[in-house]
Image (spheres, rainbow, N blue to C red):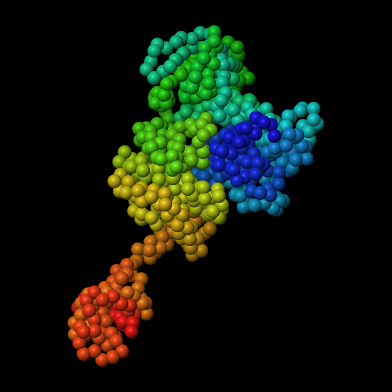
Amino acid sequence: MNRIIQSFLKTHIHEYELESLSEEVAFEHFINRCIINKYSSERFDPNLIMTDAGEKGLDGVAIIINERLISDINQAKSIMENMSNLEVSLVFIQSKTSEKFNASEIGDFIYGVKAFFESPENRPETNEKMESLIAIKDYIYENSVNLSQAPTLDLYYACCGTWDDGNGIQPRIDIELKPLVENTIFSSVNFYKYDHEKIISTYKELKKKVSREIAMEKRATFPQIDGVKQAYIGFVKCKDYINLLIDSDGKIMNNIFEDNVRDFQGYNVINSEIQTTLKDTDDQARFAILNNGITIVANQIKITGDNVEMYDYQIVNGCQTSYVLYDNQDFIKENSYLVIKIIEVSNSNIADRIIYTTNRQTEVKSEAFVSSTKFHKRLQDFYNSIEPEYRLFYERRSKQYDLDDSISKNKVISLTAQITSYLAMFLNEPQSTHRYYGELLNAYKNRIFLDTDSYEAYYIAAYYLYYVEQQFRNQKISRDLKSFKYHLLCAMRAYLVGKSVNYGKARVQKKEFETLFSAAKCNIIDEALKTAIMCIEKVKENTSVPPQDQHRSKEFTNELFVEVDKVSSACANTAFLKTNDIVHCTVISVNSSFVSVKIKTDDSRDHGFIHISNIAQKYIQNLRDEIKIGEIFQAKIIGDYQEDNNHGWELSKIF
């Protein structure tokens, strides 16, 4: 393996805690992350892309809808029902640590892709995970009327060697791909050869350790502004600007729009007008005065003559214009210019303010701004206040921790994960967590992220999610329960502190946090998880809800609470003594016929009575001569005793 790639892989293994995996499997995980990062605007778990062992020819499969990785058919349904201008990418990946491209292995890879689209009767036998992905694909095509165009099909073959156009493999690739290319169910079919150079450049793009330089001959410097190191406004050629948008494959880089609050909206009225302007020769020459321009925030700016070099930059306003320019670059002429603001800020608060104000000038869905509010900033501060051993990292801004190799990516909590974990654990809604996060924010806007909530509740929900996902990663929980991940959180909380919903009650939430956090620190969390698993399995066995609907059924959740309540009630019940038990007693009073005793026990019924006939195997003239106050002895419970509301045990002294 190339030494540079090996160093990248070592960092990746540390970030995702993959030390238990073989180098080959860890490499597949690494490549899957690098490639799908190009498509997803949100943080994702590379394990969701990994195929199960034994899957011929395929190491990774990803279904992307509007820049979101879909791993469950209910996610697909939610996003397709709640979003317009849907764009779908079907991505297949094969990864090899070898240093030579192998035609036979590439053939197996393409065969695996073809098999994915075969009818059930012709498809080779596969596994449950692949069948689930096929079901998502089928659902998308059944509802293709909602798509802006047919899905794209992208194949990536990664190898640590060097690709040589003269190696004779390309003709075989073309022949193998021909049935897919000619199939009308795809808008395009693309095959990407990733050799060691492409792998290196892709990883650097993922880490944003790239810079771009653009000519900005006519520019003005902003006056000194508090919180801004330097800023410029000026004209750049549209052709030059496109170079800021594309990666080494010539594809648009989604990650430079992570801080832009809106995805590309497709060719709506406004974007269609921009496209019309570009296709009109006269209007295109006026583009700089007809368009609102672009705002870029960079981590560092360097000026050399007429050129501006930007390092780690984000296009925070101008996503729509950028996509339209990219799509129509063949029409762009040399005399077309664009107005750009380039800003280097000194802290993230200024960047948040720029993002908010520049995007607020146009209609943007409110959920896009949610993580920039004061509550979320303070929530991030709370995460950072937790002791290192239990610290997680709240990612208010998408992929903000990707540059930090020292942080385990398993410990990074995205906005979506924060919402779903809290929803499941503290609002008792695990069956709703598959829904699109914007839909959840709207549906629960009066119960989530309230100013009267405690930050503790949100953190501990995320921590329990992290803990459960770690157990799945370490194979401590059966994969059959993967779709019940959020039910586990819900059941664990109900078992440890009860199922009462207390949104907006910070004091109550803090008390619950103390119990839940203490449980995590002293391994009570392990027992709580075992109890939750057993309760879920019992409900699965006895419920009338169909198996395919259980994880999104409110009825199933209610039945789960019943089982958890049974266990909690049994644990809380202190009445455990029974007839024939031998107990230790202390004499507390003696009368002519009975001895009253205190039983050494935690049972709520801790007192009893012994009749004179059960004191000794002899005639007793005076009971007080035989038994003394404070005397301790063993006795056997022989039944219940109740007299004048004095309910206890009837016992017999052990002779």
Residue drawn at point x = 36 percent, y = 71 percent:
576
Residue 48 position within the rendered picture, expressed as x and y whole percent measured from the top left: 57, 44
Left or right: where 170 falls relative to 441: right
Coordinates of residue 50 in the picture (x, y in percent):
61, 44
> What residue do we see at 61% from left, 25% from top?
247
Placement of 563 over or under 267, stated as above or below? below
Image quadrant occupied by the N terminus: top right
Instruction: Work out whether 354 lies above or below 83.
Output: above
Q: In the rendered view of the protein, which quadrant contains the C terminus?
A: bottom left
Answer whether residue 404 is visible to the viewer in this image: yes
Can residue 648 be seen here? The reply is no
| 104 relative to 594 in the view: left or right | right
Report the front residue among 266 and 416. 416
The single residue placed furthest to the bottom in the displayed view is 619
Q: How far across and how far down the image is residue 141, in percent? A: 60, 43
Dividing the picture into quadrants, the one containing residue 71 is top right
Residue 164, how many percent across, how many down? Answer: 76, 28
Query: Residue 126, relative to residue 191: is it above or below?
Result: below
Quadrant of the rendered structure where residue 95 is?
top right
Look at 49% across and 44% down and name the residue there: 78
Q: Nearer the viewer, residue 253 or 523?
A: 523
Q: Nearer the viewer, residue 116 or 570?
A: 570
- The image quadrant of residue 442 is top left
Q: Nearer the viewer, residue 406 or 28?
A: 406
In the rendered picture of this protein, how many numbered marks are placed on residues? 0
Residue at 21% over, 90% down: 621
604 relative to 390, above or below: below
